[in-house]
Amino acid sequence: MSGHTAPSLLLNDEQKMLSKTAHEFIRERGAAARIRTFRDSNDEVGFSRELWNEMAELGWLGLQIPEAYNGLGLGFFDLCVVLEQSGRELMPEPFVSTLLLGTQALLLGGTDAQKKALLPGISAGETLVTVGYEEAGSHGDISKVATTTRKSADRFELSGEKVQVLDGHLSDRIIVSATTSDSAYTLFLVDPTQSGVAITRQSRIDGLNAAIVRLEGVSVTVDDIVGELDGGASLLQAVCDRAAVGLSAQMLGASEQAFADTIEYLKEREQFGVPIGSFQALQHRAVSVYTELALTRSVVLAAARAIDEAPDDIARLASLAKATASETFMHAAKEAIQMHGGIGVTDEHDIGFYIKRAQATYMTFGKPSQHRQRWAELHGY
Amino acid sequence: MGELETFRAEVRAWVRENAPTSLRGTSGSGPFEGYWGGSKCEETDPDLLRWRDLGVEKGWTAPSWPKEYGGGGLSHEQEEIIHAEMKAIGVPRPVAGQGLAMFGPVLLKYGNDAQRARHLPGIARGEVRWCQGYSEPNAGSDLANLQLKAERDGDEFVLNGQKIWTSHANLSDWIYCLTRTDPNAPKKQMGISVILADLDTPGITVRRIDLISGYSPFCETFFDNVRVPVDQLVGTENEGWTIAKAILGHERSSIGRSIARQPGSAQQEVVARARKHLDVADGAIPDPLLRDDLASLGMLEEAFHLTLARIQQSAASGTPGPEGSITKIVGTELKQKRFELGMRVAGIQGLGWEGPGFDDDDLQYTRDWLRSRASTIEGGSSEIQKNIVSKRVLGLPEGKK
């Protein structure tokens, strides 16, 4: 903590109610088993549009969007309350692409015209906006951009290839990074129906939907720039910090659920005539996961709070939250499988989806080691 | 401004006006740091003694105890505020130790009026120092196996047996003991009673134990036909196990909190040692693996502090969560990691025991590293803590140990 007074790490009464409502709704309607259904049926959407619209009606998609753009004008902290619950069931709906990447980019860098054009639709569940920033050679380093621009008169022509663009197969707009000078890049809004854009759907282990977005001479104007010309790096970093915190909230929820399912199983499953949860070898390992969950909840809440209230502390706490949540989720998922025994490695059981998501989230918005390096830099060593 | 905020402002002003300058920045303000007092105390630092007197006068050595027993008559929230404001400028509490942190609260709850009136004011003033008689050679993690015999003889109990790990018994005035008053009770948790004894009572012998660190804060305490009046029994005879558990609860949360120094201080300390021993005055430390480990430590430290804050906030809001049970496990782990990394960066300069070729800071650090190994054992080992969390928080079925 910088300074001596810790941020408030408690939910207020409205947030507690929101958390409870979201918990019940998602448990009822959004179970993790849906991932198997979408996968096995080769579903073209890969998530439920219907459910997304219902959540829009509940106000959850526009929680953080200002009232001027038809949102509820609450904070990022409130959004994290819903994200945590969505994480419990590994929901494949476009939370990360649209609410974290697209919305944060527009809120931080969008012009009023861009916000007017897109945010009300996001809030209503009709519009999906994602950010394409990973490339085949970037290895999680957002400063490496091989997509280029060619300037002609007042237009830019974008060429390059973005990979694993979340919900790239269905997004109405894709914000992409492309170099605009030797040392700088810029974020541009691209309409995927434009000529020169080719979308190829990808299939990942974790049930989230992704696509390769190939750009060949895609023509955009200065009106399509998000943020400043040549200012892509700092804007994308700020977007990724917010997205990392939101993703950490989802990872916290996912870890909690994997852990709860495991504790349940330890109480039920009998071997040697007793519940396996009576074995100390398993009890102590379960407590280790429990302690990590408690620590993770604290850092995620602190980081979410910082986004609303302490801008100078966002980078540090985002790194703390993402590194901590990544390690906790991976640990919880591995222990969940081990403690479920044989059934845990079958496709039939849902617990295996958790380790797949844990691996995907571990690698998204910075690996823990990258965040520890940044933490060290921010602390002057 | 709410009532508590007004109070906080008053406390802040008072602490900043009155805390001796020499004590500022010297302490994490935990319950076991600073002046422990007692009749055998040889403290001469005038600032420490003045700070004690100021605290006693305000009733702020035991803010939430009733005024009639030397306390401040304040709420637990107000007590938290007082401690937080002392911590904010790094001054110790005016009086510290087991009497205030562990024995006093339990006597308030389980003792009778005469016992409270007799013992609490001396604790609050730092005049009487208490130690704890819990463990025995055959009753460590299996504490309920304790055997110190207390037999009723008229108006007295006669104590025979031995206690071990009686911290600072050599410097204490009184001991609160778990004793076996009914050896035939059907369960070993039954038949235990809490009995208080003046350490000057004939028949009590105290012997110091040297630890691997070379320090000897611990003692063995022997009881050979020690006669104490029956009014030194706390609570109901043979029902002392409940009290014992309550004291252990205070001990766990105290140890967890006492490890919590200033946020960021563990990281700072180890980074400073790395700079000193690796001769890197400023900027990035060139070893990326070391940097990664330092950051892991710093992150764990911050997560621990945020968790303590969250526990405090939810307790203050009236709905304490179950997380309190993990503070000892995490706090002691953090402490050991800190010393391990601090030793690693020192290389062979961390190998000194005493004498030439080693500077005082490094010698002290090495002793502290050795001492830190006890933190996951004392006050209920980490394994015992995990048993407790497993049963009480996770609701896992009890099995064979």
Image: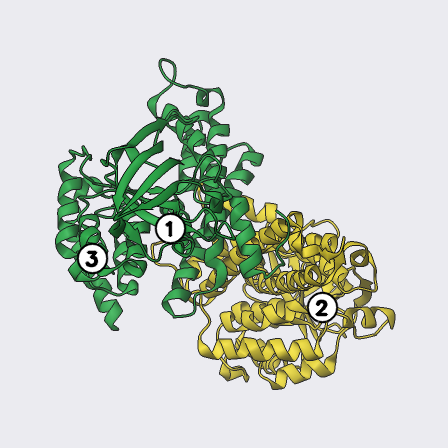
Q: Amino acid at mark 3?
A: Ala
The residue beneath circle 2 is A219
Task: Pick the residue in front: A139 or A90.
Answer: A90
CB under 8 Å between callouts 3 and 2?
Answer: no
CB under 8 Å between callouts 1 and 2?
Answer: no
Q: Residue furthest front?
A: B154
Q: Amino acid at mark 2?
A: Ser
Q: Are marks 1 and 3 on the same chain?
A: yes
Instruction: Calculate the distance from the C-alpha at mark 1 to the C-alpha at mark 2.
Output: 85 Å
Crowdedness near tag 1: few (<14), some (14–19) or many (≥20) residues, C-alpha within 10 Å: many
Residue B193's mark? 1
- Whether residue A271 is situated above or below residue A75 in the rendered picture: above
The residue beneath circle 3 is B114
Question: Label 2: chain?
Answer: A
- Coloring scheme used: by chain
Q: Residue furthest top?
A: B356
Q: Are marks 3 and 2 on the same chain?
A: no
Residue A327's mark? none
